[in-house]
Image: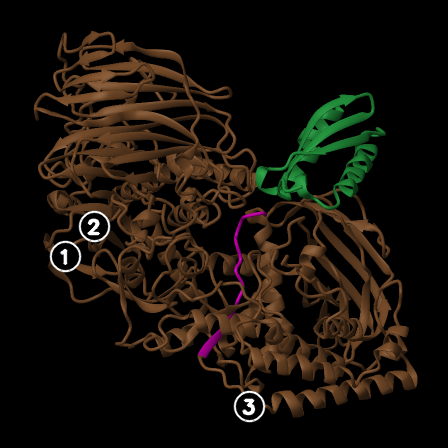
Chain colours: A brown, B green
Amino acid sequence: MAFVQVVRRSMRPEEYTDLRFNWLKRAVYDQKVEVTDLVIRDARQVGENEYEYANDWHPLRRGELYYTPDGTVFFKGKATVPPELKGKELWLSLWSAAEVIIKVNGKYIGGIDPNRDRCLLSPYIDSDELDIEMEGYNRSKPDDERNPDAMALRGCRQVFQGLYLATIHHDVLDLFYDLQLLLDVAKSSYFNEDYRKFLNRELSKALDLIDFDTLRAGEDLATGDMRLAGAEQQEFLRQVRAARQYIADVIYANDDFKGTGNVALVGHSHLDLAYYWRLIHTVHKNARTILIQMRLMDRYPDFKYTHTQAYTYELLEKYYPDLFAELKEKVAAGNFEPVGAMYVEPDCNVPAAESLARQLLYGQQYFRKTFGRTIRNAWLPDVFGNSWILPQILKKGGVDYFVSNKMSTWNDTNRFPHNNFLWKGIDGTTVYASVPPTHFITWNMPSQIQENWEAYQDKETGGQTLSMFGYGDGGSGATEEMIELMHRFDKLSVMPKTEHMGAQEFLDRNLGGNDKLEVWDGELYLEMHRGTFTTKADLKRANRELEFALRDVEILGVLRAAAGEPMDAAALRAVYKQFLVNQFHDILPGSHIHPVFEDAMENYAQVRKALEGWRGAGDRWFNTLNFKRSAPVFVPDESGAVERCGVRGRFVQPDLGALAAAETLPALPACPGWLRQDGLQVETPVYRLAFTADGSLTSVYDKALGREWVDGVWNRLHIYQDLPGTYDAWDILPNYKDKELTLAVAAPLALRYADDTMAEFAATVATKDSTWTRIIRLFAQSRMIEVENEVDWHETHKLAKAEFGVNVLTRELVCDTSAGFIRRETHRNTTWQQARFEVCSHKWCDLGETGAGVAFVNEGMYGVGVGGNAVTLSLLRATMRPDITSDRGRHAFCYQILPHAGDFIAAGINRFALEQNVPLTRPALPAAAPAALQPWLDDLAAAGDKLVLQALKVSEDGKQVVARLVETNGARGTLALHAPVQPVNLLEDAEGEPTAAIPYHPFEIISFAWAL
Amino acid sequence: MELKTYLTEVVAPKVRGDGGWIDVVDIAGDTVRVQLQGECSKCNIAKDCMDWICAEARRELGREIKIEFQRKKPFFWDTV
């Protein structure tokens, strides 16, 4: 018998309930009086507080189009409260996709955005004459695509729906919220089926008490509002109250259906500093968000809201001092809670340890100065995975608690096994960690809370589960309805117990001192967004370059300060902060629109220029590393014979002591006749190599070690189809190798330069749209092989990788984290390894076996493919969203290959990588190193074989020198100093007693200070 | 200012600020053919935006133009 699917064509009772719910929504307003004396001025924001105006003030009437692409609109309006509204609770109503800050009679009364269409007016005015000023910023893509109302309004041109003075029917609004709450439960499969049937039946009965025929007859066909008058209105309101009473008596009073669970509700707003908007727009977005949340606190004294990122507080203080003064009052009252500790919410994969330390230093510095408190939590809900180095850095930055959501909600393969737990870092430091079970953007619906409880995996050990509520990504936060619903939750027996609280309260109560918590020991790898290690390669390279440039300039600053020539500390701090802002988790990862990229590159150029100014020009080469430099490196020299990444220069083999200067650098050792070539077969004193025409290598025979290094191929360029879908800039899919372009050899491998020290071979391959030249550098007396890439890249949805199959038996890839190493399995035994097919690696990674291995060193590339005994270095992508130009154009970059005897520690791979990443320069050094400083420099140099100098800086108070060293080899020891120093944390607080011997454990970061 | 320069240097950056992208394909007399990419490629009100560009060209350049537009969606939005 054929099966015929029956599609119901008549309306179900539940659908009729929905209809009536929406009619009630249109009956919320009692009276509405349009503000018609309204003029606007179109503008475009071009700076933090700068605008270009497109026109002069002109009238705006309902039904007209307004807003323009990337547009800001300024409004001015005048209104007189009409007699019929005098003395009543008065609202200002505007339905708009834009984000609007509203001032009336000089006071900030509130904000409107796609998630709310009115703000309360009457408490903030003392006159019936209203002088209205508004600033609105509009984008075609609303902040939150989860809100259907917002999506319905999207578009860079908007139809002006009218600005109104209004009153509302609170009885209707209360019933609307009752229904919103109960309909969410009724529609959610997370709740008991019988209870949902009960709800559907009883809600319909409650609404049967209202005469909707009469209500609908009162519809204003122009606006859709439903409004009655006189006796009809009174009768309607009586019916509404009767319906509410029915719900109270029958539904809220029912406790036959028992829910379980205990959920903490924390209000917040996710505010991407830049994403589908530029950094400059965050000034306004942040102020709107804070204003709206403070107005909710005025109405709901129990409402608490958390807000991250010291940078956003700085913006508010600078541009909205009135709001900032009010914010400080709300903070003091306990309603407004600064969280997050860091300067911004940075990406937590690509920034190096010192950058993360500075996020904490400058974030906490601000919170201490402004609010007199150290923030004890890191609030990073949206970051794309978290480096293993974080726990130690957090703890030493005054932070005990870590919060981040994505591993639980975005992992594509494995269910992250904990929500409330202890996170054990690379050095063994633990922090309390919360990875809440559900998304960081929720709208506080019962179904979302129930879903959170059901997904919560630490029910028996973790205490309450954390549910964040509030709209984001571009700010906005909690809404009136979220709070109204929250006030009804305890009336519903079917729901988990809920408790609204602040973030720190949740953490202290449930995680602090909880000895039942499970431990996660390892990185918090996100099984998603693996493309963000690679997307927008220019940003990554600039970030790496400037991280080390900042380090160098601070070291110079110490030398100069000790010589009585201090740098401008405030200016240097400002530059550092400018750099840190660009590590925000939608800037540095590359997940943003094109103007954000342009801004970031401009920011980097400004930082570079400032640092070069401070660096100055001297006549001695200075080694800022605290160990002797001896690896071959390239230095600029206009008379040099080599051009590398567009810079003319030469390779040198420095023999330069730690933290020391020299007038000259030795050339590479000459070895006449060192190079032999027979077609694609090349022999050097170190290797016998077999090239292919495209610049790949099929054999690298190590003459000294007597072994073949290649298993398969080295340096094979692959260009894969890269189709992750909507999350284009973010993701690389596991099947990226399925389809690959065939590369034509445009210029076969040929020797292009050779002297007595080094040689360059070049080969060019091409696709229909792109060309890719690889210059392979071989050295007479070095094991290093360098590959320079000159790329003219015009692909779409492609991923370029360089493959290296290494002739070692290994099941681990060792990766640099910037502060120690992490071992990642290269096999695919379980889903955990299968999901970790692309990882983030800092300066180097290494495939080895007992006695030997091969290191791959980069100068600002982070994506590495893992599998068996091969690595693939991710070089370039070509994504389309959010930026259709992403990575297109010319690129020049190098990586180095270093086969070595011994393991990566014995071979000094981290040092070698530092030498490749920290350029040798001739800065303007003080005439003579101050004698008082020299013993300290000697101490740091003596430690150089065990500890890496991560930072050497003048302390924030200008009175001390702070040194920060990191153990990177996994060893334990004691640092001996010539005189006692004061151990400090990352915030430069003294910790413990002065000492001349500082014990350290594997991967520990130690900081100490002495008087300048 | 030349019309093409105006469209590429004044109008297009504004559109990019909204996550959109507009490329001028050709200009024949007063008719401009443009291709919409990025967020513009799926915009519900592209016609309104084109009308605004025409109005801006009239206001700033004193030129009456007509815009014909095509959408070029990335594959993941090309569902129809």
Q: Is mark 1 on a helix, strand or loop?
A: strand
Q: Name the residue under label 3.
A: A255
Category of crowding for the residue at label 3, using alpha-carbon neighbours closer than 10 angstroms: few (below 14), some (14–19), many (at least 20): few
Q: Which of marks 1 and 3 is nearer the N terminus?
A: 3
* Closer to the camera in the image, A830 or A104: A830
Three-letter amino acid code of the residue under disc 1: Tyr
Three-letter amino acid code of the residue under disc 3: Asp
Per the model, the C-alpha gap separating discs 2 and 1 is 10 Å
Q: Are marks 2 and 1 on the same chain?
A: yes
Residue at 64% over, 57% down: A2
Look at the numbered discs 2 and 1 and tell me whether their residues touch, using CB distance below 8 Å. yes
Three-letter amino acid code of the residue under disc 2: Leu
What chain letter is assigned to the residue under label 1?
A: A
State which region is magenta: A262-276
Per the model, the C-alpha gap separating discs 2 and 3 is 61 Å
Look at the numbered discs 1 and 3 and tell me whether their residues touch, using CB distance below 8 Å. no
